[in-house]
Image (cartoon, grey):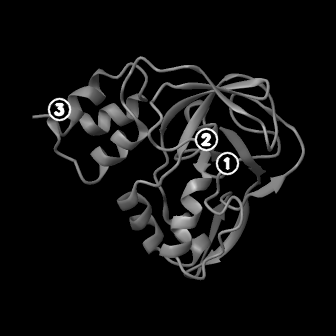
Amino acid sequence: MKVVALSVGGPREIEWNGDTVRTSIFKTPTERRLRVSALNIEGDEQSDLSVHGGTEKAVYAYPSEHYPLWQKDLSGADLSEAAFGENLTTEGLTEEVRIGDRFRIGTAEFVVTQPRMPCFKLGIKFGRQDVLRRMLRTGRTGFYFSVAVEGEIGAGDTIELVQESQDELTVSDVVRLFTVEAKNQTLLRRVMRSPVLPQNWKDYFGERLE
């Protein structure tokens, strides 16, 4: 497992439907080694902290394995590196990672916290809002890391699993519960028992328990 690309970017303003939208979804790959702190990566900045960023969404990872599939689904779309606004384009990790899995990259360590829920800004980037529905339907959401140990990382770094979560809940489980298995009571109870899934997800899913 490794980091295929490391990408960062700051806020920019774009015009959309007659309004000005502030977004940080446009990321640029870098060959430099960058410092990782508890809230983000050096040179990276989130625009809307109500839905992005914070300790539980410090770094966004996206599997490189999904890119060929998107090339078929989104014919003609720009699918250059960091197309989905990710910080880490990875190889060998998918949404089957467990919530709470801990990985070492470079001298930093990261913990899987939750899936990425796409917003309209991803649709703006691709020039088509149907990409949100497609991302959720396929489960190709990518996932967020919190930073357990600050350090330095770079493109090409090995991704090493240093501690497997005791919770069997995967990123894919959470996405399925959000979409196609909304009333799965067995999965809902597993979510509510999770010691590592962020509380806002538990609050959301708790309303569905019978």
Q: Which residue is mark 3?
A: 186
Kind of element beneath mark 2: loop
Query: Looking at the rendering, in which quadrant would you find the C terminus?
Result: top left
Q: Position of residue 189 (x, y in %)?
A: 21, 28
The tag earlier along the polypeptide, 3 or 2, is 2
Label 3: how many Cα within 10 Å (few below 14, some 14–19, many 20+) = few
| Distance from the alpha carbon under mark 3 to that under mark 1 | 35 Å
Q: Which residue is mark 1?
A: 46
Kind of element beneath mark 1: loop
Q: Nearer the viewer, mark 3 or mark 1?
A: 3
- Residue type at mark 1: give it: Gln
Label 2: how many Cα within 10 Å (few below 14, some 14–19, many 20+) = some
Kind of element beneath mark 3: helix
Seen at 79% across and 24% down, the residue is 107
Label 1: how many Cα within 10 Å (few below 14, some 14–19, many 20+) = many
- Residue type at mark 2: give it: Gly
Q: Position of residue 172 (x, y in %)?
A: 39, 43
User: Which of the numbered marks, if any, corresponds to residue 176?
Assistant: none
Left or right of 209: which side holds 34? right
The tag earlier along the polypeptide, 3 or 1, is 1
Left or right of 180: which side holds 121? right
Are the two marked residues, 2 and 1, in contact with CB atoms closer than 8 angstroms? yes
Q: Position of residue 36 (x, y in %)?
A: 77, 32
Q: Position of residue 6 (x, y in %)?
A: 76, 47
| Distance from the alpha carbon under mark 3 to that under mark 2 | 30 Å
The tag earlier along the polypeptide, 2 or 1, is 1
Q: Quadrant of residue 106?
A: top right
Residue closer to the observer: 198 or 110: 110
User: Which of the numbered marks, if any, corresponds to residue 53?
Assistant: 2
Seen at 38% across and 18% down, the residue is 195
